Image: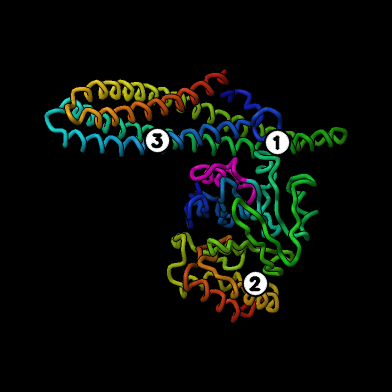
Amino acid sequence: MKTSHSIYQDGNHRWLAIVRDPERAGHLIDTNEFLVESGGDSLLCDPGGIEIFPAVFSALCAEADPTAIRGIFASHQDPDIISSLALWLDFNPALKCYTSWLWATFLPHFGGTADTFVSIPDEGMPIPLGALDLRAIPAHYLHSSGNHHLYDPKARILFSGDVGAALLPPERNGLFVEDFDSHIRFAEGFHRRWMGSNAAKMAWCERVAALEIDMLCPQHGAIYQGADVGRFIQWFADLDVGRLRE
Amino acid sequence: MDVSTFEGVGAPSAQESLLARIVRVNEEIKAIVATAFKINLMALNAIFLAKRAGTAALGFGVLSNELRRFAEDLTREMAALRVMTAGSVSTVSSLMQQRRLNSILAATVKECADAQIPALTPVVERGEWSMDEQLTRLRALDKSLHGALADTNRLAELGGVLARSAKIEAAYGGRYSTALMQVSTDFAEVIELIKLSLEKLTKERLAKDR
């Protein structure tokens, strides 16, 4: 069973992290889902795969009202990101799914109609939610060729999809990164192999270094906060990516 | 709740899906949990007030202790109810997932009707078996939830009686009478809210029971 944790709250503006499922089958990669709430509406970031839908839905219901979900943000097209789409749409057929224009005709293979998808242009766009203007930030080729992250300027939180992901052993199950140097070892191989372009990586690093970020929330592994956010961006900028083997 | 046919599990239709109903029950229970927490604080305040009032509020003091115990019991009952509804949400969402897979399989069988592919039969059977198994689990959960709701209803009745008695005792509270009356009225109102929520939950379930 996954658990929900509130990682930011200011009145009705809240970020909920849905993380860690000890009962998850070992052959499934562990994922984090994030729910952003504002003014009674909410947006679910990378809701996960079809296999984990019951775990995500139950954990979300424990802390939030799922009927308030107005949209889904899919950072890219992978099955661990969005293959549960049809089930979320069964629950609420009016949901909108925000994703890169590149995947607008691919994601309907997971479910949805022509009305479901809102295409995000390459340069990103604002995504309104309650009193907030969230922003889809370009992160192309990191690792998907059509890829966006979600920035909340008020909470100063960046949902960073696969960037910042770490494949952690079961005993390292903390919500936040506690020791950057030992944590980053579990992120290195993943980033070298999955992030395909040094040029794309540098463009992203420059883009996000200009944002005010208190928390960087990846789709796998622990959340970076405070000074670890800057440390991560610098570490990533220095890393030679797009390599088959170290 | 009609778990025998689980109409609408995962199917977008005019009829509200079972998952949406379970979610509504879950939300209602979360609201009662929040109220139960409020009662706990109110009972503590009542105990302090009774102590300040001294001998004039001896009877009220006894009742406020009982109300405090009631609030603790209610919190415990609600925690158990939350676990049960969380289990129901999980089972219904699994059912929804299985139903979608089964409907895709059924469409495949239909498409392949002319080709006669015997290997599809056990696949469909496994899907149906899995659905039946989850349905059995859901029925068991539904039964437990019914029982727990009935227990909580009885507890809320007791809370109502305690609140009424507290009102009577408040009348003997001398110069603290007004303050004690206010506390006991607040109690009665909150307990009434809880009873209304529980009644709504019970009615909803019974109305759709087999």
Looking at the rendered structure, the secondary structure element under dot 3 is helix
Q: In the picture, residue B6 is in which quadrant?
A: top right
- Circles 3 and 2 in contact, beta carbons < 8 Å: no
Please report the bounds of the magenta region as a residue range: A47-69
Q: Amino acid at mark 1?
A: Asn
Report which residue position mark 3 lands on: B35
Report which residue position mark 2 lands on: A193
Looking at the rendered structure, the secondary structure element under dot 2 is helix
Q: In the picture, residue B152 is in which quadrant?
A: top left
> Which quarter shows the C terminus of chain B?
top right
> Which quarter shows the N terminus of chain B?
top right
Indicate yes or no whether the magenta region holds residue A68: yes
Q: Position of residue A100 (x, y in %)?
A: 74, 60
Q: In the picture, residue A142 is in which quadrant?
A: bottom right
Q: Amino acid at mark 3?
A: Thr
- Judged by its main secondary structure, the magenta piece is helix
Q: For the residue carrying disc 3, how many other residues have a C-alpha within 10 Å: few (<14), some (14-19), or many (20+)?
A: some
Residue depicted at x 27% and y 27% = B181
The chain letter for the residue carrying disc 2 is A
- Circles 1 and 3 in contact, beta carbons < 8 Å: no
Indicate yes or no whether the magenta region holds residue A54: yes
The CA distance from mark 1 to mark 3 is 41 Å
The CA distance from mark 3 to mark 2 is 51 Å
Residue depicted at x 68% and y 50% = A83
Q: Position of residue B81 (x, y in %)?
A: 43, 33
Quick one: A24 or B183, which is closer to the camera? Answer: B183
Q: Nearer the viewer, mark 1 or mark 3?
A: 3
Residue depicted at x 57% and y 75% = A233
Q: How is the image coloured?
A: rainbow
Report which residue position mark 1 lands on: B102
Question: In the image, is residue A194 above or below residue A127?
Answer: below
